[in-house]
Image: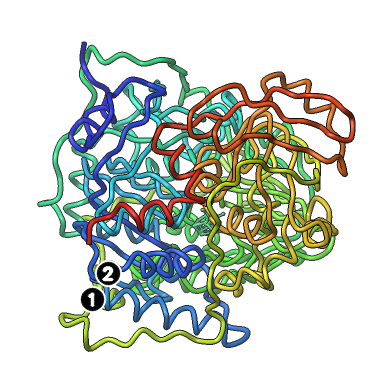
Amino acid sequence: MGYTLSQKIIKNHLISGTMAAGEEISIRIDQTLTQDSTGTMAYLQFEAMGIDKVRTEKSVAYIDHNTLQAGFENADDHKYIQTVASKHGIFCSKPGNGICHQVQLERFGIPGKTLLGSDSHTPTGGGIGMLAIGAGGLDVAVAMGGGPYYITMPKMMKVELRGKLRKWVTAKDIILDVLRQISVKGGVGYILEYAGEGVKTLSVPERATITNMGAEHGATTSIFPSDEVTLEFLKAQGREGDWSELKADDDAVYDKTIVVDLDALVPMVAKPHSPDAVETVDAVGKIKVDQVFIGSCTNSSYTDMMKVAKILKGKTVHPDVSLVIGPGSKQVLTMLAENGALADMIDAGARILESACGPCIGMGQSPKTDAISLRTNNRNFYGRSGTMSAQVYLVSPEVAAVSALTGVLTNPCDLGDTVDISVEMPKKFKVNDNMVIPPAENSADVEVVRGPNIKPFPINKPLAEDVEGVSLIKVEDNITTDHIMPSNAKLLPYRSNIPYLSDYCLAPCDENFSKRAKENGGGFIIAGSNYGQGSSREHAALVPLYLGIKAVIAKSFARIHMANLINNGIMPLTFKNADDYDKIDEGDTLALDGIRGLILNGGEIVLKDVTKGIEIPVDITLSDRQRQIMAAGGLLNFTKANITK
Ligand code: MIC
Ligand code: SF4
């Protein structure tokens, strides 16, 4: 029996375990990336491990999320990251150089290698055949220290691409169709491998749009083969030496197959507030638009931007629309500036942003009250734009640009052949890595600068024999990490300050949650299915830890968040019978007797609802290693005791 593409990469990197789906395996990590909003914590944790130099082939610290500098906080974080990176053998991509995933793809990603990133959209690297996985900061810190990365061996899903996209239909529509088919939970436990005749018709940036947004269906990662198209891309980046061919064996076996007929696709849109609320643009109709944002790590490549420039050239943005464009990297922005496309955008009335995450994570450009905002990014979770009443629709750059001109959601196919949007992939990209600072040769020369915004992070205590507390909140299905630990221009500057952030934990669900947690000295969270979907932010576990949360009892969990809870010693318990969710109310006193022994040795776990006098069977899925981590009170305690200096 042959191997799938990702099974081959896993096999080449396997450290422990057997490659049977559902088993815990550990793999060697070749490259890591961090970004600033998860990076400060990851580097504080790395420092706490006491390792001098990273032990990866390449580690890059990007500064791309917190680039608005409305006070000293972000600039302090930037300085800390640049100095701590320099001291420990890590390259630092300075603010302005671009969004981590775009730059990693352009400059550092290598087919067949493993990449672990403290950002959920790390799978962008799958666009060039990397096994690129998003994780919490602590997992990335351990990987930087040379420690293995542990995952549950995923099942394999083949996405067969048939035919060829028609004009005005894009890679964004492919991934939106996948989300329509499998939902925001459908990828959990899988790697999605793209295959079929349609693959060769897609450029690397198109492939990267698809693997990037794979984060939204919850998969461990998504990947394309590395072929001639990949070679041409790497050649144009001056990196042909990094190329190797990679594909699945003909007799590879998949657990599931889905099909996307590229010829039949039409422009799509994901409606508020979920990336899987997908409909065709025509079905949603010509709704009036207030804001359009074109950018983010999903759709900010050179080719995306050139198409947008061609649509805008010689036209004017509709008077009622604010059009904002953020090219993905310095490379993209420089090329647009040199070939005149930037002038076409500015002339049409676009507001140009620096190459950074920007509006995608609510760092500026929050829309007006009740606004309709069309965005090319990957997430439209409630409140993420910074305006709670805004309605964010996810679309392709083509739909976005055309709608910015008409002022209403517009199917670009209506333009037919009146606009030429053909863009050649450059034979040579503009390569200048002058904003990537190499690490110091002599780390003793580097002083790590810590501003007053850098506060210590919470570390759990070993798990107690018995645990008791109050059910502090009961939330529904698909709660995102943007609910658990919101991010916007007011909060993101405090990513290194857990006590400050703690006041806002779960605020979009209930603004009194944090107060209640503090009054009760911690307790439990009760949740529906897919709890913690979305971002990799470890803050969604660190802040609950700070608030004294002992366990989250849910119908099911999203992968990265569940790992973050375990890493911080918070128990992710699941209801054995999903209906038992209905039996617990907010305010009930809950108890887990003898839980330490049960976690360490296994056995039936019973959650007592002391208030109601009932017993509820619950479960926890842990490997032997995770049992030890949980008992130790988290991965840091566990690693400190185990890692070799
Ligand atoms: C996101 O897109 O949600 C983020 C912001 O990039 C996060 C990371 C973070 O919260 O800092 C992610 O995707 O992991
Ligand atoms: Fe940045 Fe948005 Fe991409 Fe997250 S999804 S890395 S915030 S651009």
Secondary element at tag 2:
loop
User: Seen in the image, is 597 located left or right of residue 625?
Assistant: right
Name the residue at 44% across, 51% down. 635
Secondary element at tag 1:
loop
In which quadrant will I find the C terminus? bottom left
Mark 1 Cα within 10 Å, few/some/many (few <14, many 20+)? many
Q: Quadrant of residue 7?
A: top left
**Residue 389 visible, this orientation:** no
Name the residue at 55% across, 86% down. 452
- Residue 112: give x, y in percent of width and height: 21, 40
Query: Which residue is more in the foreground, 466 or 93?
Result: 466
Residue topped by disc 2: 90
- Residue 613: give x, y in percent of width and height: 87, 27
Q: Earlier in the sequence, mark 2 or mark 1?
A: 2
Q: Mark 2 and mark 1 in contact? Answer it, CB < 8 Å.
A: yes
Three-letter amino acid code of the residue under disc 1: Pro
In which quadrant will I find the N terminus? top left
- Residue 333: give x, y in percent of width and height: 40, 70
Q: Which mark is residue 439?
A: 1
